[in-house]
Amino acid sequence: MAGNNLFNLKAFHDDEGLNVVVETPKGSRNKYEYDERLGLFKLGGVLLSGASFPFDFGFVPSTLGGDGDPLDVLVLMDEPAFAGCLVRTRLVGVVEAEQTERDGETTRNDRLVGVAADSRLLARVRTLEALGPDLLEEIEHFFVSYNAIKGKVFKPLGRFGPRRAMKLVEEGMKRFRRSRRKRTPAGSGKAKKRK
């Protein structure tokens, strides 16, 4: 399946828009995740009644974050997409965060925030501030509560603009390239579980 691996798509579209692969659509209680080994999307869990993803959630291909997974992105757009949809995205910022697992291990697990390049309703949004403080609080609260249900602690460290977000993507691309150089032959490693 290595030739059809979504993690290996380019991080950027030809016009410099960020490529984002949607895993979980807006409004879904089901959490979907891409399984690299199988080359398909699978159910990773179900949120409690009344809880759902506030926006489409996915990853930037050809990147790795501090937690060893592709960088996470929340994509705002006019209508929900679907699992596996490739969305050209304009970065507007990042919520930098630490995540502590049940075993006490703490890693960086930032949440990039972007707007679909083809969005009509959000065409003028270029920064996190343009989304307003209430919406940003809701986004942070979702990730805090979502992780708390799973026995994890999600601690926001700060909100930053598109320049800082772009720097994190560039660092994630470098980390991805280094990991691929070190990688064992195809088929010998186990699938990476998304968090």
Image (cartoon, rainbow, N blue to C red):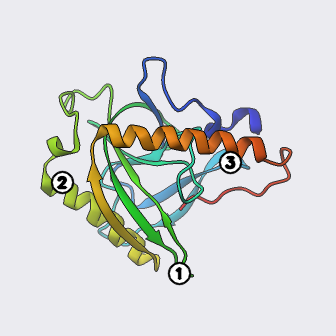
Name the amino acid, label 1: Gly
Q: Are marks 3 and 1 in contact (CB under 8 Å)?
A: no
Number of marks drawn: 3
Residue at the image point whose x is 86% and y is 45% from the top: 185
Residue 159 in the figure: left or right of residue 59: left
Q: Determine whether 55 is above or below 162 in the image.
A: below
Q: Describe the element under mark 2 as helix, strand or loop.
A: helix
Q: Label 2, label 1: how many angstroms apart (C-alpha)?
A: 30 Å
In primary-sequence order, the first of circles 2 and 1 is 1
Residue at the image point whose x is 22% and y is 44% from the top: 128
Judging by the rendered image, the residue that carries numbered circle 3 is: 36
Judging by the rendered image, the residue that carries numbered circle 1 is: 104
Spot occupied by residue 62 in the image (x, y as percentages of width and height): 59, 38
In primary-sequence order, the first of circles 3 and 2 is 3
Between 67 and 81, which is closer to the camera in this rendering?
67
Location of residue 44 by image quarter: bottom right
In primary-sequence order, the first of circles 3 and 1 is 3
Residue 25 can be seen in this image: no
Judging by the rendered image, the residue that carries numbered circle 2 is: 135
Residue 131 in the figure: left or right of residue 67: left
Q: Determine whether 47 is above or below 22 in the image.
A: below
Label 3 packing within 10 angstroms: few (<14), some (14-19), many (20+): many
Q: Describe the element under mark 3 as helix, strand or loop.
A: loop
Q: Are marks 3 and 2 in contact (CB under 8 Å)?
A: no
